[in-house]
C-alpha cells in the first residue's frame, strides 16, 4: 500500500534554513550547536521563535530527551517537541514529520532541527538478538566495501572511478563554509592509504562529527499572515519514506532506494530527468553511483562513466552533492538530512553562491538509515 | 581446518560452538542452523525466532532447517581497520549465496582476498579457536574456495 502523497494535503513550503558548521567533536554542549542553527533559520525566514508552533528534532547519537534542554534557550513557549530517531535518516524523518504536521493542518509553522554529537553510536542488531557468522565484524564501512566489490564487478568500473566521487564532492565541499572537510582532493590523495575495508580508503569514507541544521516549514496561510517572502519559499512536492522488504537476487540497499524513488517521483508528479540538484547518502563513494542508478538519474552501470564526464558536477546536467555531500560536508547523523534540505533550498532560491547550480528549479534529498529505511524529499523552486 | 578425531586412544575434547545457535559442530561437513517457515516455505539465515519476515507467520510456524555450508561468492572485502579488538586485521568478509537459498555473510579462512573472485564456489570448514575453562575445544566456521569460477 502506498501513500497518497504530500500533494494530496495542503501545500507546505520551506521558509527558513540555518546550519551550525559540521566539524570534529568538540567540548561544546549540544544546545549551543542546535540553537545556533535555529537562530540562523529564524533569521533566514524573518520569523521569531514564538512564531514556531511545533518542533521535531532529528537525533540518534547524543542522548535521550534532548529537545527541551536545547529549545529553552530560545525562550520557553510550551510548544510540542519530540525527538525523531531513524539512524542516518533521523533528520530527514524529522523534516518529514514537520511537513506532515503542517500539511495536515495541525499547525501552520513547524521546525525540523537535526543536532548530534557522536557520543553513543550503537547498532541495533545485537540488541535485537540478530547474530551472524561474522560475529558483528561487518561495520558500515565493511558493509559498503562489500557493495563496492559487487558494484565494480557488475558495472565493470574500476577503483579510480569510485575515487572520482570523492574528488568531485571535495571540490564542492571546499566551497561550503559549513563543511567538515574543506579542501579539494586529488584522485591520488583519495586513493592513497590508509586502506579501511576492501577498496575503500579513508577519504572514500565520510567523517562523522558534530553539528546542527534547521529547516522551518509553513503553510500558505502562515506565509500570508506572517508576511513571509513568497519568492524565497520552496515548495515541498513530496515526502516519501519506506523500509526494506525482501529483494531476491538484488542488492537490498539499491533496491530500497529504487522503490522509494519510484514512489517519490510519482507523488511529486516529476521524472528523474527533471532534477537539477540532488543531495544523497554518499557516506561511502560507491553509494553515490549505486543510488544515482537506483533512482533512475543514471542508467544502470553508467554512473561512473557519466561522473567522469562531468554530468554530476555543479554546472553539469544535474549537480549531485553540491554541498560536498556526506563525504565532504560530513555526516553528524541527526543533522545530515536536514542539512540536505538547507542546501537544496539555497540552490532552488539561487542563493548557493559559488556552489550554485545554474537555473535550478527542482531538487531531491535522499537518505538511508541502518535498519533499513529510506527517506526522499522532492522540492520545487518558488 | 580440523578433523573430528585425532585418531588416538585419548578421547577428543568436547567441542563447543564459538557462536551458539548458528551451526552444529557435531556435523562434518559443516551445517548451518537456519529457519524455514512452515507457512510460506521461505528459508532464513541467521535463524529467525519470533516471526516470519516474509509472511508474518508466528513463531509456531518456524522450524529449524539445516542448510549446507556451501555456495557461491557474491562479494568480498578484506578489512584493514576494525573497531573491535577480538580479531586481528587483515581479515576477509564474504557475502555468500548458499546452495540452499539464503545469502549469508561469513569470514573467509584466508586473511586477504588475493585469490578470490565473484562467483567462486566456497565451502565452510571448521577451525579450532581455543578452549574454554572446562577444556572444551571452541569451534568456529570459516569459508574457503572449493571451486574457482574459471
Image (spheres, coloured by chain):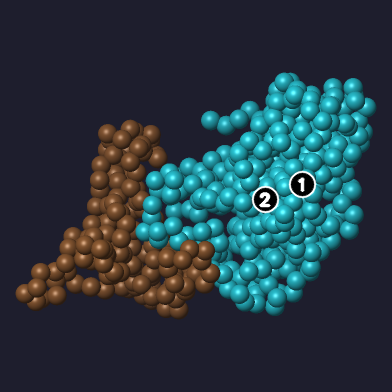
Viewer-nearest residue: A46 or A222 = A46
Task: Chain letter for cyan, please.
Answer: A
Instruction: Determine whether, in the image, residue B93 is placed left or right of residue A180.
Output: left
Q: Would residue A319 be seen by someone viewing this image from the given angle?
A: no
Instruction: Determine whether, in the image, residue B27 is placed left or right of residue A341.
Output: left
Query: Tag 1, which secondary structure?
Result: helix
Q: Would residue B57 be seen by someone viewing this image from the given angle?
A: yes
User: Looking at the image, is mark 1 or mark 2 earlier in the sequence?
Assistant: 1
Cα–Cα span, label 1 and label 2:
9 Å
Instruction: Determine whether, in the image, residue A381 is placed left or right of residue B87.
Output: right
Residue at 26% from the left image edge and 67% from the top image edge: B131
What percent of the width, then of the height, locates residue A173? 78, 61
Of all residues shown, which one is farthest toward the left? B9
Read off the chain for label 2.
Answer: A
Determine the image quadrant of residue A152: bottom right
What percent of the width, then of the height, locates residue A374? 60, 44
Viewer-nearest residue: B118 or A41 = A41
Q: Is the residue marked by circle 1 packed among few (<14), some (14-19), or many (20+) residues within 10 Å?
A: many
Q: Is the residue marked by circle 2 packed among few (<14), some (14-19), or many (20+) residues within 10 Å?
A: many
Query: Tag 2, which secondary structure?
Result: loop
What percent of the width, then of the height, locates residue B7? 10, 76
Residue at 27% from the left image edge and 34% from the top image edge: B60
Q: Which residue is mark 2?
A: A117
Question: In this rendering, is residue B97 above or below B146?
Answer: above
Read off the chain for label 1.
Answer: A
What color was chain B assigned in the picture?
A: brown
What percent of the width, then of the height, locates residue A212? 75, 47
Q: How many marks?
A: 2
Q: Check if mark 1's residue and mark 2's residue have beta carbons within 8 Å.
A: yes
Q: Which residue is mark 1?
A: A33
Amino acid at each position: 500500500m502506498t501513500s497518497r502523497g504530500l500533494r494530496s494535503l495542503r501545500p507546505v513550503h520551506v521558509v527558513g534554513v540555518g546550519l551550525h558548521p559540521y566539524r570534529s567533536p568538540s567540548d561544546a554542549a549540544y544546545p549551543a550547536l542546535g540553537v545556533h542553527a535555529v537562530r540562523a533559520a529564524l533569521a533566514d525566514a524573518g520569523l521569531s521563535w514564538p512564531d514556531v508552533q511545533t518542533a521535531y528534532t532529528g537525533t540518534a547519537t547524543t542522548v535521550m530527551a534532548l529537545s527541551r534542554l536545547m529549545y529553552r534557550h530560545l525562550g520557553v513557549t510550551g510548544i510540542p517537541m519530540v525527538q525523531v530517531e531513524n539512524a542516518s535518516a533521523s533528520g530527514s524523518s524529522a523534516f518529514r514529520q514537520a511537513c506532515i504536521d503542517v500539511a495536515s493542518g495541525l499547525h501552520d509553522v513547524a521546525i525540523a532541527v537535526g543536532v548530534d554529537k557522536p557520543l553513543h553510536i550503537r547498532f541495533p542488531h545485537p540488541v535485537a538478538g540478530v547474530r551472524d557468522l561474522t560475529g558483528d565484524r561487518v561495520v558500515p564501512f565493511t558493509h559498503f566495501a562489500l557493495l563496492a566489490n559487487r558494484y565494480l564487478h557488475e558495472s565493470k568500473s574500476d577503483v579510480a572511478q569510485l575515487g572520482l566521487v570523492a574528488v568531485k564532492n571535495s571540490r564542492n565541499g571546499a566551497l561550503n563554509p559549513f563543511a567538515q572537510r574543506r579542501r579539494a582532493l586529488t584522485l591520488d590523495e583519495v586513493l592513497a592509504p590508509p586502506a579501511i575495508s576492501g577498496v575503500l580508503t579513508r577519504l572514500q569514507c565520510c567523517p562523522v562529527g558534530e553539528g546542527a541544521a534547521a529547516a522551518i516549514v509553513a503553510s500558505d496561510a502562515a506565509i500570508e499572515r506572517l508576511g513571509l517572502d513568497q519568492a524565497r519559499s520552496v515548495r515541498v512536492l513530496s515526502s516519501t519514506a519506506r523500509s526494506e522488504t525482501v529483494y531476491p537476487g538484488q542488492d537490498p540497499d539499491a533496491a530500497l532506494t529504487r522503490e522509494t524513488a519510484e514512489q517519490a517521483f510519482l507523488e511529486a508528479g516529476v521524472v528523474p530527468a527533471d532534477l537539477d540538484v540532488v543531495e544523497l547518502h554518499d557516506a561511502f563513494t560507491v553509494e553515490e553511483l549505486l543510488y544515482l542508478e537506483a533512482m533512475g538519474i543514471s542508467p544502470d552501470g553508467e554512473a561512473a562513466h557519466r561522473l567522469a564526464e562531468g554530468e554530476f558536477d555543479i554546472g553539469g546536467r544535474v549537480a549531485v552533492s553540491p554541498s560536498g555531500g556526506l563525504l565532504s560536508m560530513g555526516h553528524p547523523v541527526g543533522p545530515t538530512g536536514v542539512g540536505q534540505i538547507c542546501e537544496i533550498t539555497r540552490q532552488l532560491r539561487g542563493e548557493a553562491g559559488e556552489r550554485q547550480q545554474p537555473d535550478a528549479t527542482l531538487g531531491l534529498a535522499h537518505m538511508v538509515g541502518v535498519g533499513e529505511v529510506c527517506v526522499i524529499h522532492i522540492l520545487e523552486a518558488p | 581446518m580440523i578433523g573430528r578425531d585425532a585418531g588416538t586412544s585419548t578421547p577428543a575434547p568436547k567441542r563447543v560452538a564459538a557462536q551458539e545457535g548458528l551451526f552444529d559442530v557435531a556435523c562434518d561437513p559443516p551445517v548451518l542452523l537456519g529457519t524455514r517457515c512452515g507457512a510460506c516455505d521461505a528459508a532464513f539465515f541467521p535463524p529467525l525466532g519470533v516471526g516470519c519476515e516474509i509472511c508474518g507467520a508466528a513463531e509456531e510456524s518456524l522450524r529449524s532447517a539445516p542448510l549446507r555450508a556451501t555456495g557461491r561468492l557474491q562479494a568480498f572485502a578484506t578489512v584493514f581497520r576494525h573497531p573491535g579488538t577480538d580479531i586481528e586485521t587483515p581479515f576477509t568478509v564474504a557475502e555468500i549465496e548458499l546452495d540452499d537459498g539464503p545469502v549469508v555473510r561469513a569470514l573467509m579462512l584466508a586473511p586477504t582476498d588475493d585469490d578470490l573472485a565473484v562467483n567462486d564456489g566456497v565451502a565452510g570448514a571448521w577451525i579450532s579457536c581455543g578452549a574454554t575453562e572446562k577444556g572444551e575445544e571452541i569451534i568456529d566456521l570459516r569459508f574457503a574456495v572449493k571451486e574457482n569460477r574459471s
